Amino acid sequence: MNIGKIFLVGAGPGDPELISVKGLKCLNIADVVLHDRLIDLSILKNAKSSAEIINVGKTPGDNPQIQNDINQLMVKKAFEGKNVVRLKGGDPFIFGRGSEEALYLNSFGIEFEIIPGISSINGVSAYAGIPLTHRGISSSFTVLTGTEILNEEEKLIGFNETLKFGDTIIVLMGLKNINNIIDVFINRGLSKDTPIALVGFGTMPNQNTIVGSLKNIISKLQCSKLSSPVVVIIGEVVKLRKQIKWYDNKPLFGKNVLITRAHIQSSSLARLFSSKGANPIEFPTIEIKPIKNNKILEENLNNSKNFDWILFTSQNAVKIFFDRMFDLGKDIRHIYPAQIGAIGNITSEYLKSYGVVPDIVGENNNSSDFIDEFKGVDFEDLKILLPKGKKSKSDLYDALISRGAFPTNLEIYDTVLPNSNKLDLYEIINNGLDVCTFTSPSTVENLIKFLQGDLNLLSKSKIACIGSVTAKTAQEIGLKVEIISEDYTIEGLVEAVENYYIREAYHE
């Protein structure tokens, strides 16, 4: 009988990039993933497409039987011959029931591995800019769980020793009982002036930190919107946050940014916004679908060397054109001696990923102006192939005709509305949307379709567009465009949004 293996993997405290390399490799090969409630779901993109994803997350107050159900499910999947990742928030062995699960697996003779994770103990404190130890201030730290009511004497075993020798105290899961916890610390000898920090949703874009002292932190908490999960840090090291905090200082920290480009292309843009501290929210408004059984594409591919130029206006056209060429058993030598042109740096870079360096790259993303960048080229009688989408505008085609060329439009893909739930979009907007990004006219038009034409829903959001063409489409629809990237790349778009908020902060 083939029995699978269980990997108890720590996913880290929240930021999906804080998972270990080994943990990520386990996730890549897992047949089944059983994940906790508080992990960032984007981390599940690293699982293989055939993996069975099961949410086994518990919430406070759940029936204890749920943990038994999780244990039994792991065993069941293992006996089915499946390799299972039990993906746990933080570290499996730090308040994570990982040891209990390991003992249960051992009782059935099931092989398992423990993959440590970054705990919220050091992960959240680091993102809050609070060191747990600092020379001359703190030489040790103690970790407690706040789920127990600390003012019950029978639960205070060794607590006096903690206060005596622990320079820094960390309390996990302590928000619910924060009043009792603070009373206990004061009653057991800590000064009311002892610094304290409450860090909610640490390492995530919605991280929220409140700093005060034991005597005033409750009143500050009542005036805040802090919610669980919260890490409590107590000690003189909290005072260092003012100089060391870095995550909160990121230019787009806490900004909710909507990404509307196609799902296959959205991850790279999301990562860039995340690196600036933003909270990227993916809601694809377009889906790229290659035209099936495209005999015209195959005919033009077979005759591509008969063209003087092949001009690509998007990365979608590049991908579909070359993927089909490779499927037919041909490589880039087949298009020789045709020269290659690309509109925009995004298209150019995508061509390079296929081993093709374009002969000319249009800096202006406007198709009708593209041919003005062909310095010294006489278009008279030139045969030019234009791989494009069905809904793409004919500006470039018309401009080439006016120059005496013989262009051929080659429709190879269509942009359609994806099967997305518009109720999800309304929820995203209702939760507060700071920036709405558009990377093409289609993303603008389709988002408005999802909103059924109600532009007021975006009235509180900054509209950010790549290029003048996309911006013009948004403006013609009636949106107020405040951010336009002059660099036609996703990097340029993120930089434009960043610069906008830097200017806003400067003028405040």
Image (cartoon, rainbow, N blue to C red):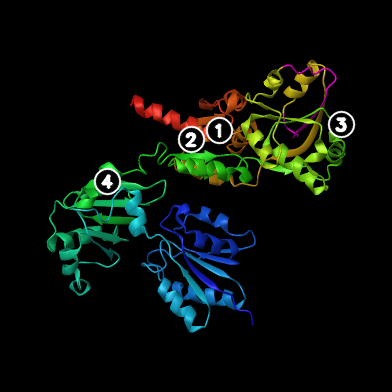
Q: Which residues are magenta?
A: 376-392
**How far separated are the C-alphas under marks 1 and 2?**
17 Å
The relative height of residue 483 versus residue 6 in the rendered view (above or below) is above
Which residue has dot 4 on it? 241
Give the structural element (helix, strand or loop) at label 4. Answer: helix
- Classed neighbour count for the residue bearing mark 4: other residues with Cα under 10 Å, few (<14), some (14–19), many (≥20): some
Query: In the rendered image, which quarter contains the C terminus?
Result: top left
In the displayed structure, 161 sits above or below 474; it is below
User: Is 171 left, or right, of 159 in this rendering?
Assistant: right
The circle on residue 306 is 3
Between disc 2 and disc 3, whose residue precedes?
3
Image coordinates for residue 217, horizontal then vertical, percent: 21, 50
Residue at x 58%, y 67% (from the top left corner):
32
Which of the labelled discs sits on residue 281, or is there none?
none
The span from disc 2 to disc 3 (Cα, nearest Å) is 46 Å
Tag 1 residue: 454
Q: Earlier in the sequence, mark 4 or mark 3?
A: 4
Residue 66 visible in this rendered orientation of the protein: yes
**Which one is in front in this view, the residue at disc 4 or the one at disc 2?**
4
